[in-house]
Image (tube, rainbow, N blue to C red):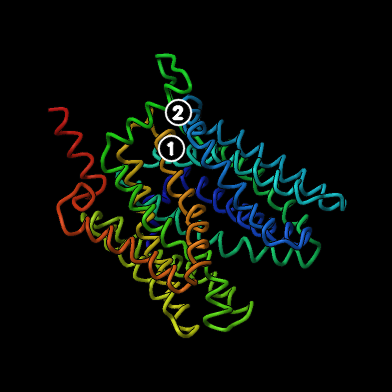
Amino acid sequence: MSLPEVLRHRDFTLYWSGVVLSQIGTRGTVAANFFHVYALTGSVMQTGLVGAAQAVALLVLSPLGGFYADRMDRRRLLQWAQAVALLVALGLAVLTLTGVVTAWQVLLSVLLTTAAATFDQPARQALIPAMVPRSQLPQAFALLNPSRELAVLAGPAIAGLLITAGGPGLMYALDAITYAALIVVLALLKVPPLAADTVPQSLWRGIAEGARFVARRRIIWKLMTLDLSATLFGAYRAVLPALAIDVLHVGGTEYGLLAAAPSAGALLATYAVFRVVDRSRRLGRVLLVSTVLYGVSAVLLAQSPALALALAAAGLLGAFDAMATSIRHAAVQLETPDELRGRVSAFYQMSSRGGPALGDTLIGAVAGVVGPVVALTAGGLVPVCYAGAFLLRPTEVRSYQGADDVAERSAASTQ
């Protein structure tokens, strides 16, 4: 099998490797944070504050991070964000290993790390077009998104081993090392800096400009609503423990397998996702069908009477999510001019990352009233109906073809 074209670009290969390593550290630390707060407090409610801290920082600061991603050199901004997160991880590691850490300090570290990530993520997304040709952007995102799933699998597993060996402090120390590694990788990249805006612009005016672009570019906000239909209403993670214990009547080991199954499905589907986004000219239809099948898989997961069927449904859910996510992320970058990429990525981040956080709260609350099976079944039907409606009539999303489609529309607009 020949090396994918996108991996023949030195800068992207370096960047991809650094991001994978950093994501493993980040995901492992999140798992350690949950465990650590519960170990310190014994309270499930206080443990849930880890997710709340992430959501607050994400939703409040994302537009600000996007603004600076369009005003500063994106590589430098990434390095500064990684440096802040490194200091937070190092400080928490010291407090933990010396035995003086408290729960509120762990929660504060989550808030600060997520705050740094709100500047990090828009710059990460917006930097990629500087490393690969526009025609290879779908390939780039088809590789980056499964890498996230690898981190979801490997990070918590490493965290578990380190917690067993010496406590959460070891995981925090490893996280600091991965941040340092990405800072070094970023220093080795040879990408052109973003040209400074010739017209001075205030913070709020700059954020408003990004919001207006999203509102006027119909395909982008429609992609955001498709994302929300799946992540907000099909937030399966919130009900997995109840499904495992109360419906499938299994224990912690089986629950761990169930929680890992979506990421495993995404990884197993990597080759198929890569081939489709690289060769298909019907990416809009593929996106919509994948979103529908994501909802169907969520319903199957909720209705599964046996663990084997639940594992299969969860794996399919992860595979269809990987396909849809790769196409959406690449489409947003292709549709956005370079000078707005940071702000648009930040607004998109509010749906792609904020949606799951809010979805866990929504589906968890509904499940508390009607039970996990009914809650996830009803939630899974939302993306089925919503994406299905897009399939039934001509829309920008259904007709979307990828880079060629964007190039054709750009050429037509200049004539």
Q: List x then y, in percent, for residue 284.
A: 24, 54
Q: Is 66 rendered above or below residue 327?
A: above
In the image, 48 versus 132, the foreground residue is 48
Q: Within the image, what quadrant is residue 214 found in?
A: top left
Q: Of the residues shown, which amino acid type is indicated by label 1?
A: Ala
Quarter of the image for the N terminus: give it.
bottom left
Q: What distance separates the C-alpha of mark 2 from that of mark 1? A: 9 Å
Q: Is 3 rendered above or below residue 164?
A: above
What residue is rendered at 40% in x and 69% in y?
A: 298
In the image, 398 versus 42, the foreground residue is 42
* Relative to 392, 312 lies left or right: right
Q: Are marks 2 and 1 in contact (CB under 8 Å)?
A: yes
Badge count: 2
Between discs 2 and 1, the one toward the N terminus: 2
What residue is rendered at 33% in x and 61% in y?
A: 383
Q: Of the residues shown, which amino acid type is indicated by label 2?
A: Asp
Where disc 2 sits, the SS reads: helix
What residue is rendered at 70% in x and 45% in y?
A: 109
Q: List x then y, in percent, for residue 146.
A: 46, 59
Q: Classify 10 Å Cα crowding around label 1: few (below 14), some (14-19), many (20 and above).
A: many
Q: Within the image, what quadrant is residue 29 found in?
A: bottom right
Residue 198's tag is: none
Quarter of the image for the C terminus: give it.
top left
- Residue denoted by label 1: 126
* Relative to 154, 311 lies left or right: left
In the image, 142 versus 302, the foreground residue is 302
Where disc 1 sits, the SS reads: helix
**Farthest-out residue, top:** 199
Residue 70's tag is: 2
Q: Within the image, what quadrant is residue 162 found in?
A: bottom right
Q: Classify 10 Å Cα crowding around label 2: few (below 14), some (14-19), many (20 and above).
A: many
